[in-house]
Structures are given as structure tokens and as C-alpha cells.
């Protein structure tokens, strides 16, 4: 009779123990997944910041390039005008 009770107790305890163990492992796995999701959110936010900064730098670079082109054209125009003025002065002095 005692053996029968021990056997029944073990048969009841084994599935309950397995169920508890599986539930505990699932909770541990969920904790790891949540931590991974949190880390992913942080990295994604950092990536978005970096992409925004990169786009801002590219836009600024385009603005500086356009400004450089305008300045180069302006310098060429002013040099040409200066050269024309020098030529006119030379003609006046010769006359």
C-alpha cells in the first residue's frame, strides 16, 4: 500500500514538476526576448539619429558646393572686369 501511494505521488509530482520547469524556462526566455527588443529599440533610435545627421551633413555639403560654384563664377567675372578696366586704362594713357 505504501509503495502504491509513493508511486501515485511520484506520478503526480513528475508532470507538475515538468510543467513548473517549462513555465520557468519560458519566463526566462521571455525576459531575454524583452531585453533584446529593448536593446533593438535603443539601437534603432541611434541609427535614426545618425541617419538624420548624415542627411543634414549631405545637405550642407551640397549647399557649400553650390556656394563654391557661385563664388568661382563671381571671381571669374570680376577678374574679367578687372582685366577690361586695366586694358581701358592702358588705352587712355596711350592716347
Image (spheres, rainbow, N blue to C red):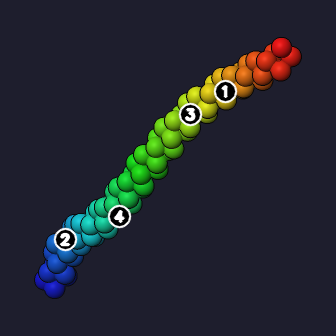
In three-dimensional space, the C-alpha distance between marks 4 and 2, rounded to whole angstroms, equals 29 Å
* Label 4 with label 1: CB-CB less than 8 Å: no
Task: State left or right for residue 29 relative to residue 10.
Answer: right
In three-dimensional space, the C-alpha distance between marks 2 and 1, rounded to whole angstroms, equals 92 Å
Reading the image, the residue beneath label 1 is: 78
Reading the image, the residue beneath label 4 is: 35
Q: What is the x, y in percent for residue 30? A: 29, 62
Q: Within the image, what quadrant is residue 3 found in?
A: bottom left
User: Disc 2 or disc 1, which is closer to the eye?
Assistant: 1
In three-dimensional space, the C-alpha distance between marks 1 and 3, rounded to whole angstroms, equals 16 Å
Reading the image, the residue beneath label 3 is: 67
Which image quadrant: the N terminus? bottom left
Q: Earlier in the sequence, mark 4 or mark 1?
A: 4
Identify the residue at image location x=56%, y=34%.
Answer: 67
Q: Earlier in the sequence, mark 2 or mark 3?
A: 2
Q: Nearer the viewer, residue 51 or 81?
A: 81
Amino acid at each position: 500500500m505504501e509503495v502504491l501511494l509513493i508511486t501515485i505521488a511520484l506520478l503526480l509530482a513528475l508532470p507538475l514538476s515538468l510543467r513548473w520547469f517549462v513555465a520557468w524556462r519560458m519566463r526566462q526566455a521571455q525576459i531575454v526576448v524583452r531585453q533584446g527588443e529593448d536593446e533593438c529599440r535603443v539601437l534603432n533610435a541611434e541609427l535614426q539619429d545618425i541617419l538624420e545627421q548624415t542627411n543634414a551633413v549631405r545637405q550642407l555639403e551640397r549647399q557649400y558646393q553650390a556656394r563654391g560654384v557661385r563664388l568661382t563664377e563671381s571671381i571669374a567675372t570680376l577678374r574679367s572686369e578687372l582685366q577690361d578696366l586695366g586694358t581701358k586704362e592702358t588705352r587712355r594713357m596711350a592716347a
